[in-house]
Amino acid sequence: MTGAITTRGLTLLFWIIAALIYLPIGVMAVFSFSSARYQILPIPAYTTDWYARVFTDGQYSAGFANSILLAATVSLAATLIGFACAYSLVNARFPGKTAFTLLVLAPLAVPLLLVGIALRIWTTMLGLQPSLPLAGVGQVLYVLPLAVLNLRNRIAQLPKSHEEAAWALGASRLRAIVDVILPACQTSLLATFILCFTFAFDEFVIAYFLTNFSITLPIKIWTTLVTGFDPTINALGTMVFAFSLLLGVTAQWLLMRKDP
Amino acid sequence: MRAKSVTLRGVSKSFGQVQAVCAQDLEVRAGEFLTLLGPSGCGKTTLLRMIAGLEAVSTGTIFVGDEDVTSHPPNRRDTSIMFQDYALFPHKSVRDNIAYGLKMRGQPEAVRSKAAEGWLARIGLEGYGKRLPSALSGGQRQRVALARALILEPGVLLLDEPLGALDAGLRRHLQVELRRLHRDVGLTFIAVTHDQEEAMTMSDRIAVMREGRIEQLGTPADIYDHPRTEFVARFVGRCSVIEGRVGTGDGGGMVQVETAALGLVLAKGTGLRGANLRLALRPEALILDQTGPCRARVTDAVFTGNAIRLTLMAADGTGLELDLPRGAPVPATGSETGVRLPPGAAIVLAS
């Protein structure tokens, strides 16, 4: 009996937490269709004007374009570097391998604010101007652990004999990776790319510290909120949330589906 | 001739503190079928992988033909390897799997295609070229893996437990197939197995391995009839072991041994007068003879298909196994009977 009660309690807890997370987003989504400038009830009339504003206001679309470009480049780089890291972590035997693994994965545990400040100080010392590419480099550091973890798991599952068979048939190390390992990792690579994309697309702190005038979408949202509330943010936020949710679910679905 | 010899000189391999292979010399002749036979963990697979270049040697030198390949990577050795799990590339078609080696050699598509089709016909899988390996049965995959390994006509084909993943009936059939294939292609085959029957059926010579060392190297008949150690005698076929002391030497490769179990025995081998030694007896070498000089009690009788295997207890308590041909009267369990040992039926074992 206590088991059933515990289960019911946990289920209730889950729904409370889910409500705490999703209710505010739901509220935002509802008000994004309200014609009022402020979030008041009852809602006077329903409209899609704010959504139209997102697309007509050049600042939002510029931020959106910057964010897409940045996230795509960052996740591509992180996926490729992550694959190389993961492959060597699985296959290579070298002294200090454990320490190296921890170093690669450590950014996951460091508060993002510290990473952002550290990067800003460091790049200033090196005399680098804040820019979108610089923010990209910073974001690669941020999402790389995710890529390495994902791909390392997949590569570790692959039978070593497949690669060895390719070598014995005349393939070089690189050729065997291209012919045998990469095709077996297709799904994982795609999932990793999408996962990195969602993280990079929403990333605010590093982008804020390392860019100057090229504004990404999260920065645009933040500056808009600082200068005074604009209901367009509700529409924009709802769209970004739906987009991220779609990508996240796709990535998880791909990861759960087994590579052939 | 394409076939190449393989020569190992003082080859050893250690993984950390574990010595997997200890300073082994081995001479594999060009064109022969040699099997490394031994229990799991005896170092046979490690030895094979070192010949393939998949494992670096700790010490020693490996020659394929006249070429020292010790430091060559696998893709620069004239060897090919077939794995126990076949290691077919799951996302490539059967045809592309077979042709992979030619592709790595830079052969044009037309040549690859023709050669692959030729091999598909040869292994009885015409029309299967476009399928993925997952659509094939275990036996079919095994043949595809063989074709893929042989398409480059390597000087040496290495087979790691080639039939290990198949069921018993198919395995027996494929042992004969593999032997025929070896004769047809005329290449050097080196296989690894823990199955003594498989080794006997397929090989020209067998190297019995134990704890990283080759304990005995010889033809199947040689290994079976003249096992040098108790380990080899027990691993290759069944046998009983009895103890005795050397009496007057007889010469001619025979020695007289005084045993507690069977009295005076004329055994194959040599021994110093007065030395204690151990003798191996194959179950089919002992003969049941009611009037025989040695008495033994029947403790069990088991039907093995082509014989009745009796378990006997000699007067001194030593256990013996004896194969009774089908049709011969079977003595009752618990009864006393006589046993006879033809001269040379017992084999002297190295201590």
Image (cartoon, rainbow, N blue to C red):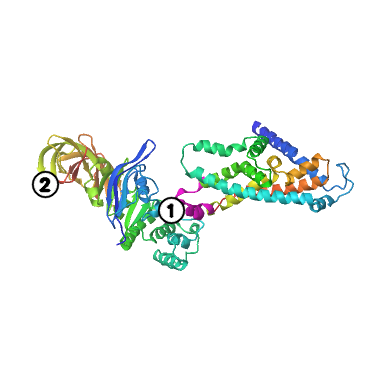
**Percent from the top left, x then y, of residue B98?**
44, 61
Which residue has dot 2 on it? B252
Q: How far apart are marks 1 and 2 (CA)?
A: 53 Å
Q: What element carries label 1?
A: helix
Quadrant in which the N terminus of chain B appears: bottom left
Residue most extreme to the right: A44
Which residue is identified by label 1?
A167
Considering depth in this image, is B106 or B24 the residue closer to the camera?
B106
In the image as oriented, which residue stretches furthest toward the front?
Answer: A127
Q: Is residue A222 left or right of residue B338?
A: right
Pinpoint the chain carrying mark 2.
B
Give left or right: position of A254 versus B214.
Answer: right
Where, quadrant-wise, is the C terminus of chain B in this rendering?
top left
The residue sitting at 68% across, 45% down in the picture is: A131
Instruction: Give percent across and percent down for residue A193.
Output: 62, 49
Residue B181 falls inside the magenta stretch: no
The stretch in magenta equals A156-182
